[in-house]
């Protein structure tokens, strides 16, 4: 049987619809890959029973033979991050109190995937409380990087990125509030899109039973895949011009186009906040920038939006801390608890102070924070009226070795605080709510992949993806980990 687990989702669906391969054969191959390698990778946290999956695949095969109308993802087995509700599967959100919580309904985006014909086969691992740049928790365990099992996969959508890189799934559904799609994509050599804030519904994501819905700001969901074409395929399913929920504006994301070969105004930064990049990552990153400079249709300028990073990091903490406080319900000293949790786990006083303030924030100060957020967004909107994209590194380094959160890194022989390697590259750019695409651009000498962030104007998600396809041509793209060759 022809191996298809590392083929693109687009190609697999084509082969299914043209009856070159059956849905049952496809499902069996992905299940076999999971059975063989998930013990080492530990990306899949909850897997549906094999007989259930194959039964659904048989129904999909029958639909093809009967000439029925087929969805965009007909017969494609995929996994989703363990923050999304999938009926009948565990939905923990990274919360130890929910480690055995079985969802009784599907998240809205999961429904859309199913309507498009996808077969949801399982859930993928994440960080404790979905709040770290590695994916480890005490009940599901540690997820390992398929390029080197001693290294992390990023977080909190780390299981998602690892599943893609390991051939467990051709598509993934992730979330990002502070780099949770971006860092895992960077560490695992895959692609990920943090969508425009409120472009896609969050209903059914990060649900705590008998609690209010939180995460209305900062958190964005988005597709993850091994190439940009597959991100486009998935976004076709996830997005809708006619939104059914009031919090999602009825914006047709496809109205903004990028014409192949059109001139491109590119802003770029060699780093952010003067954080020193790992020498090897910096070389790969700057080689990509120089390659882009040599293209005929790109005009590059070393510049970036004007903002105060400390201000935006504190603002991120206040907004996220507010949600943390809501989740703690009526527990006294919520601000102190939030502050102590961040300070003790991540050793970051600035972030801890902001989270503590947010958890106990007054209505007036919370309104002030949201108004401040709007002003920042306006500033970034003005910047992207001048430039098509802004390209930046994703973090200070490639995937690091497994370690406890909060322990400083040694980058180029210098100590770098744990959060300093990530927060400057991810928290401030979360505030404006614009779409951000990550694509792989190469590998280090030791075989660890690295990527770039490509930022664009709000609502220009599809334009960004089309533009990303052009930039992807300058790279080798996804490289199958050697352990699977």
Image: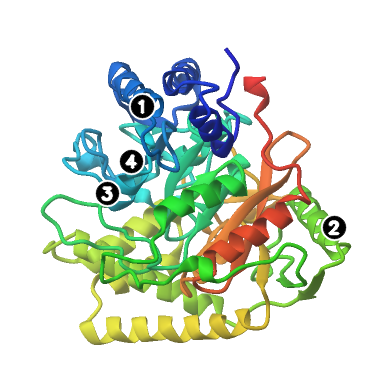
Gap between marks 2 and 1 measured at Cα: 50 Å
Q: Give me the C-alpha separation between circle 1 and circle 3.
A: 30 Å
**Crowdedness of circle 1 by 10 Å Cα count: few (<14), some, many (20+)?**
few
Observer able to see residue 393 = no
Between the C-alphas of marks 3 and 2, the distance is: 41 Å
Which residue corresponds to mark 3?
107
**In the image, residue 101 lies at what x, y percent?**
19, 38
Q: Considering depth in this image, is 478 or 261 the residue closer to the camera?
A: 261
Front label number (3 vs 2): 3
Coordinates of residue 302 in the picture (x, y in percent): 77, 75
Residues packed near mark 4 inside 10 Å, few (<14), some (14 to 19) or many (20 plus): some
On screen, residue 444 versus residue 273, left or right, reads right
Q: Quadrant of residue 457?
A: bottom right
Which badge, 3 or 2, comes first in the chain's sequence? 3
Regarding mark 2 in the picture, which secondary structure is present there?
Answer: helix
- N-terminal of the two: label 4 or label 1? 1
The numbered dot on residue 66 is 1
Q: Nearer the viewer, mark 1 or mark 3?
A: 1
Residue behind mark 2: 291
Horizontally, is 8 left or right of 247 in the view? right
Judged by depth in the image, the label closer to the viewer, 4 or 3, is: 4
Q: Which residue is disc 4 drawn over?
A: 114
Callout in the foreground (2, 1): 1
The label number, if any, that marks residue 451 in the structure image: none
């Amino acid at each position: 049987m022809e191996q298809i687990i590392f083929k693109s989702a687009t190609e697999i669906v084509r082969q299914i619809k043209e009856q070159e391969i059956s849905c049952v054969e496809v499902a069996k191959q992905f299940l076999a890959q999971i059975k063989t390698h998930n013990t080492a990778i530990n990306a899949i946290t909850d897997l549906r029973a094999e007989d259930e999956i194959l039964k659904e695949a048989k129904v999909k095969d029958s639909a093809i033979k009967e000439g029925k109308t087929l969805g965009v993802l007909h017969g494609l087995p995929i996994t989703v991050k363990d923050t999304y509700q999938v009926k009948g599967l565990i939905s923990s959100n990274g919360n130890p109190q929910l480690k055995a919580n079985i969802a009784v309904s599907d998240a809205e985006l999961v429904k859309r995937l199913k309507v498009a014909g996808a077969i949801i086969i399982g859930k993928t691992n994440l960080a404790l409380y979905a709040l770290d740049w590695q994916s480890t928790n005490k009940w599901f365990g540690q997820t390992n990087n398929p390029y080197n099992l001693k290294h992390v996969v990023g977080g909190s959508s780390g299981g998602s990125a690892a599943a893609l890189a390991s051939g467990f799934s051709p598509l993934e559904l992730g979330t990002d509030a502070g780099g949770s799609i971006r860092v895992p994509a960077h560490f695992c050599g895959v692609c990920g899109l943090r969508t425009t804030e409120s472009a896609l519904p969050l209903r059914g994501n990060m649900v705590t039973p008998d609690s209010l819905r939180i995460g209305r700001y900062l958190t964005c969901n988005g597709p993850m895949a091994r190439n940009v074409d597959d991100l486009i395929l998935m976004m076709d399913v996830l997005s809708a011009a006619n939104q059914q929920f009031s919090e999602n504006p009825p914006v047709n994301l496809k109205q903004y186009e990028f014409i192949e070969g059109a001139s491109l105004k590119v802003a770029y930064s060699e780093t952010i906040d003067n954080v020193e990049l790992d020498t090897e990552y910096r070389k790969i990153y700057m080689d990509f920038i120089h390659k882009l400079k040599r293209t005929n249709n790109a005009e590059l300028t070393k510049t970036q939006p004007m903002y105060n990073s400390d201000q935006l990091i504190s603002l991120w903490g206040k907004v996220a801390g507010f949600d943390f406080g809501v989740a703690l319900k009526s527990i006294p000293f919520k601000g102190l608890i939030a502050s102590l949790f961040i300070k003790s786990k991540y050793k970051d006083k600035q972030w801890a102070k902001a989270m503590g303030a947010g958890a106990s924030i007054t209505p007036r100060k919370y309104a002030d924070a949201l108004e401040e957020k709007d002003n920042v967004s306006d500033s970034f909107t003005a910047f992207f009226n001048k430039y098509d994209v802004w390209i930046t590194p994703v973090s200070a380094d490639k995937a690091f070795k497994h370690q406890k959160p909060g322990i400083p890194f040694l980058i180029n022989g210098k100590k770098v605080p744990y959060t300093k390697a990530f927060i400057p590259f991810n928290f401030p750019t979360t505030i404006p709510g614009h779409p951000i695409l990550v694509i792989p651009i190469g590998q280090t000498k030791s075989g660890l992949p690295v990527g770039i962030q490509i930022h664009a104007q709000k609502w220009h998600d599809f334009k960004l993806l089309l533009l990303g396809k052009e930039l992807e041509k300058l790279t080798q793209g996804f490289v199958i980990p050697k352990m699977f060759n």
